[in-house]
Amino acid sequence: MKKVTLFLIAQLIVVQLFAQTAILQSALPEKVGMSATRLKQIDKHLQNYIDKQWVAGAVGIVARNGKIVYHNSLGYSNIANKTPMKKDDIFHIMSMTKPVVSLAIMMLYEENRLMLDEPVSNYIPEFKNLQVLDSTVAKDSSFVATPTRKPLTIRHLLSHTSGIGYGFIYPTVRAIYAKAGIPDGASALRGSKVKMSEKMKILATMPLMHQPGERWTYGLSTDMLGYLVEIISGQSLADFVEQRILKPLTMNDTHFGLPKEKENRLTSVYYENEKGALGQYRKEDADFLIEGGRTYFSGGSGLVSTAMDYLKFAQMLLNGGELNGTRLVSRKTVEIMTANQIGGLFINATGDKFGLGFSVPEASGYKGVGAANSYGWGGAFTTNFWFDKKEGIAAVLMTQIAPTSHGDVVDKFKIAVYQALND
């Protein structure tokens, strides 16, 4: 009897280990309630954009219930060289860095090393005398400002209600930031050796665009969060993210600052020119993360990654903070991150809300694409991820183009994924 019990325990352990290692393995779509035939619509959709030269190439990956049902690469990573896009090619993911760094903050939150509603000035003294911008003087970029009515909190940074904007989006702060030498995230570096701590201390003295919490304003808040990670952890943001997030999730091709040996896998970046055709950025204008990312670890836009790597991150969130037996945060922390943190404010015309690091759906009257229970975010070069709690879906799309009038490639990718549900 004792031998039988030991045998059963051993079998149970084997089953549990197999279940853990089997997550994010490929499976027949029909095994998880999706149609292999209908998933081919993804290829048709992406190839259409490639044939019309709206994108150079793309990599898409989709998992349901922890099993990969679609993973393909199409088109070119470099059109001039006729280099075929590969599944493991590396992309500038830009603002898809934000969810990763937001998770880093929440890991420190779980360790009671910070509280979400405490003033940022507790850690960054430069924030003690905050002001709100009233007006600017065009001739010299000087400004008139008044004191804030309440302190700026860590939650404000996480939810992008801080009043810290992007200069390239908001003309009201563009000249002010430029005069102060503040880069708009990693994209302004281009080989610069500047350090994030230097610029964040200056940014903390700049006027906010509005009172904290009063509006949703997209900007450098997550760069500031990255600096906060460094202050609290005593590590560089790159080291903290690598040791606490990337290595545990085996995101081995995700980096701040692309390693030299992987430069041949970095996809070229394109833009839509005045004729509506694809133009390629000059290497020195596009590959800024190769050098700049080695010193300025932009929490808002500094990472490069692959579709497979980022799927692991998305699946971890979908699993409530765990992947393959490795837990990064508790499911309660993921619940906080996926809750509406901006109240009655909206981030776009479809009525999306914002959590702590990425968008969350508005439960009532959802007008978005895909489903009313999907959470995610995108990057400036038309990359995107989302995870759907109800349907058990995690998905990533990687392209490299900006600006473009064909950003609906993302929405149509989502439609192609959801139409393949077959249960």
Image (cartoon, rainbow, N blue to C red):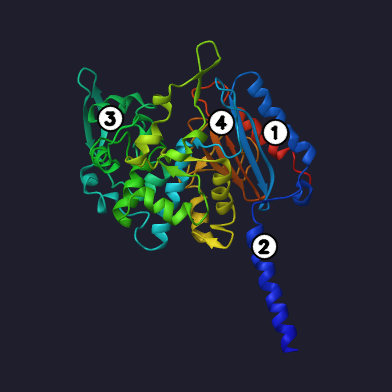
Residue holding disc 1: 42
Report which quarter residue 195 is drawn in. Answer: top left
- Spatial CA distance of label 3 from label 2 is 50 Å
Give the mark nearest the N terminus, 3 or 2: 2
User: Along the polypeptide, which appears first: circle 3 or circle 4?
Assistant: 3
Q: Residue at x 22, y 32 (%)?
A: 145
Viewer-nearest residue: 230 or 144? 230
The kind of residue tagged 1 is: Ile
Disc 3 residue type?
A: Tyr
Between disc 2 and disc 1, whose residue precedes?
2
Is residue 368 visible in the rendered image? The answer is no
Q: Is residue 45 rendered to the left or right of residue 355?
A: right
Image marks 1 and 3: residues in contact by CB distance under 8 Å: no
Q: Which mark, by number, is residue 177?
A: 3
What amino acid type is highlighted by mark number 2?
Answer: Ala
Disc 3 to disc 2: CB gap under 8 Å: no
> Mark 2 or mark 1: which is in front?
2
Rendering coords of residue 106 (x, y %)? 43, 55
Q: In this view, does 175 lie to the left or right of 300?
A: left
The single residue placed furthest to the bottom in the displayed view is: 1
Numbered mark located on residue 19 in the image:
2
* On-image quarter of the N terminus: bottom right
Which quadrant of the view contains residue 2?
Answer: bottom right
Q: Indicate the secondary structure of the residue bearing disc 4.
A: loop
Q: Reply above or below: 367 against 275.
A: below
- Secondary element under disc 2, as helix, strand or loop, is helix
What's the residue at 44%, 56% (across, down)?
A: 244
Q: How far apart are marks 1 and 3 (CA)?
A: 41 Å
User: Residue at the location (65% across, 43% down)?
Assistant: 62
Count of numbered badges drawn on the protein: 4
Q: Name the residue under label 4.
A: 399
